[in-house]
Image (cartoon, coloured by chain):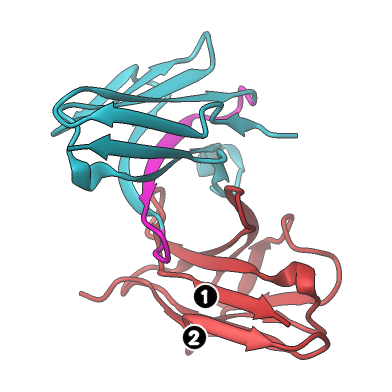
Amino acid sequence: DQQVKQNSPSLSVQEGRISILNCDYTNSMFDYFLWYKKYPAEGPTFLISISSIKDKNEDGRFTVFLNKSAKHLSLHIVPSQPGDSAVYFCAASASISSGNTGKLIFGQGTTLQVKP
Amino acid sequence: NAGVMQNPRHLVRRRGQEARLRCSPMKGHSHVYWYRQLPEEGLKFMVYLQKENIIDESGMPKERFSAEFPKEGPSILRIQQVVRGDSAAYFCASSPGVEQFFGPGTRLTVL
């Protein structure tokens, strides 16, 4: 039962262009969403998050969009740089205030390659 | 301002041995989560602990796996009588509240 899905295993874009990574979820109890970036042999690094009360959050080159009705979120990276090449995981959580424990449910990851 | 520390980074065990993985959270963080990543998969939640308490162990296998977070010292994930299927990367994360910050992981190889 995959509650968080990243249907594209890989994505290749040209340096300077936009990278769009997608994520779908099924559990309507999720109200907090995060994106992590991971290099080989390292732990995931937190990138950006969004609460379900918002539909957009921006931090520099990274923007996350949330469409609650479609249970879909996306991460936009503009402009893409070769150093962005990594595996990107989306993760979802149900709020601790609702009695949940804050554990993260991860997607399978999308490998982004940014070509110079 | 050290991040989350995990040791060892690599651990090799033979089938039937015990594996002990350690995690020191970031200073000031009292929540520790353990996740496992099998090859070609995403991270899967295992257990959530606060100091001296297991809060959520819904992702832990029923047998051979245990975790603790004592009052003093690091959190320990213990795997008894390891099998080849336990080979994976084990990550811990610490949190002050919502965002979780991950350590570099321990890569366990069972021969």
Label 2: how many Cα within 10 Å (few below 14, some 14–19, many 20+): some
Give residue B14's position: percent from left, percent from top: 75, 88
Foreground of the two, B94 or A109: A109
CB atoms of marks 1 and 2 within 8 Å: yes
The numbered disc on residue A106 is none
Q: Answer above or below: position of B26 versus A60.
A: below
- Taking the spot 36% from the left edge, 56% from the top edge, the residue there is A39
Amino acid under disc 2:
Pro
Foreground of the two, A39 or B93: A39
Quadrant containing the C terminus of chain A is top left
Residue of label 1: B106
Residues in magenta? Answer: A27-43
- In the image, residue A38 lies in the stretch drawn in magenta: yes
Amino acid under disc 1:
Thr
- Taking the spot 77% from the left edge, 91% from the top edge, the residue there is B17
Left or right of A49? Residue A23 is right
First along the sequence among labels 1 and 2? 2
Left or right of A47? Residue A109 is right
Please identify the residue farthest to the front as the structure is shown: A116
The numbered disc on residue B8 is 2
Please identify the residue farthest to the right as the structure is shown: B63
Q: Which chain is red?
A: B
* Secondary structure of the residue carrying numbered label 2: loop
Label 1 to label 2: alpha-carbon separation: 6 Å
Give residue B33's position: percent from left, percent from top: 54, 62
Give residue A103's position: percent from left, percent from top: 57, 49
Number of marks present in the image shown: 2
Give residue A101's position: percent from left, percent from top: 59, 50
